[in-house]
């Protein structure tokens, strides 16, 4: 019997679920590059140990009790390499969401993402059924602490994590 590993980072459907959860927490338009970076860390939470954070953000991160990358089953490649490999799944997921009317088309045309009314109701129902308490706490941390500490622009977010993607 052969076994096959499933990597959620490269699955378009799981990316749709993750992005929907992040946008549900956000509740306002978010630049696509910022969303890609947050989704990367949502899918690969142990890699957050490698980024630069302020003391109060690091304290909130420690409360999540996410294991360090060397303590988990997977061995992670360099963050920029994995981020680049996830690009196909992330762009496909956002295009699918926009095509199904789950994203606000005007904000998507401006390289931002925001859930439409239909998207908000759909992901609100899904979140109650499939997301664990730890995933919800991680999404809230990413939106309310990590990303909020870099609200002065993409430059500080890019420099803190070393990730960049032109949108």
Image (cartoon, rainbow, N blue to C red):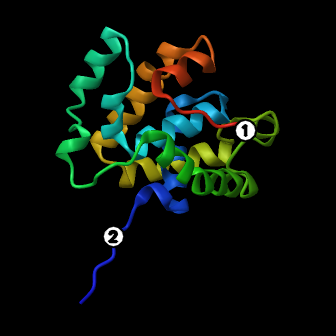
Q: Pointers 1 and 2 in contact (CB under 8 A)?
A: no
Q: Quadrant of residue 3?
A: bottom left
Query: In the rendered image of this protein, does residue 150 appear above or below residue 36?
Result: above
Q: Residue at x 43, y 22 (%)?
A: 146
Query: In the rendered image of this protein, does residue 40 appear above or below residue 142?
Result: below
Query: In the rendered image of this protein, does residue 14 appear above or below residue 78?
Result: below
Q: Residue furthest left?
A: 71
Counting other residues with Cα less than 10 Å from the Cα at mark 1, is it few (<14), some (14-19), or many (20 or more)?
Answer: few
Can you give x and y, in whole percent of width and height, for residue 52 in the image? 39, 19
Asked if residue 106 lies left or right of residue 164, the reply is right
Q: Quadrant of residue 145?
A: top left
Which quarter shows the C terminus? top right
Can you give x and y, in whole percent of width and height, for residue 85 in the image? 54, 53
Between 63 and 71, the one nearer to me in the picture: 71
Q: In terms of secondary structure, where does tag 1 sit?
A: loop
Residue, disc 2: 5
Can you give x and y, in whole percent of width and height, for residue 108 in the image? 76, 40
Residue, disc 1: 167
Q: Residue at x 28, y 40 (%)?
A: 134
Q: In terms of secondary structure, where does tag 2 sit?
A: loop
Q: Residue at x 22, y 24 (%)?
A: 63
Which quarter shows the N terminus? bottom left
For residue 2, the mark is none
Q: CA distance from mark 1 to mark 2?
A: 30 Å
Q: Quadrant of residue 12?
A: bottom right
Counting other residues with Cα less than 10 Å from the Cα at mark 2, is it few (<14), some (14-19), or many (20 or more)?
Answer: few
Asked if residue 58 lies left or right of residue 88, the reply is left
Can you give x and y, in whole percent of width and height, for residue 79 in the image? 44, 40
Q: How many marks?
A: 2
């Amino acid at each position: 019997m052969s076994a096959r590993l499933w990597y959620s980072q490269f699955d378009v459907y799981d990316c749709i679920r993750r992005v929907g959860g992040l946008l549900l927490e956000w509740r306002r338009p978010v630049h696509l590059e910022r969303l890609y970076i947050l989704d990367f860390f949502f899918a690969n939470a142990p890699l957050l140990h490698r980024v630069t954070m302020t003391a109060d953000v690091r304290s909130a991160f420690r409360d999540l009790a996410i294991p360090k990358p060397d303590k988990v089953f997977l061995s992670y490649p360099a963050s920029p390499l994995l981020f680049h490999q996830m690009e196909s799944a992330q762009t496909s997921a956002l295009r699918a969401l926009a095509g199904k009317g789950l994203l606000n088309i005007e904000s998507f045309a401006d390289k931002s993402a925001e859930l439409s009314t239909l998207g908000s109701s759909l992901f609100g129902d899904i979140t109650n059924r499939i997301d664990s308490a730890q995933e919800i706490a991680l999404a809230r941390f990413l939106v309310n602490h990590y990303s909020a500490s870099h609200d002065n622009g993409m430059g500080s977010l890019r420099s803190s994590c070393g990730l960049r993607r032109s949108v």
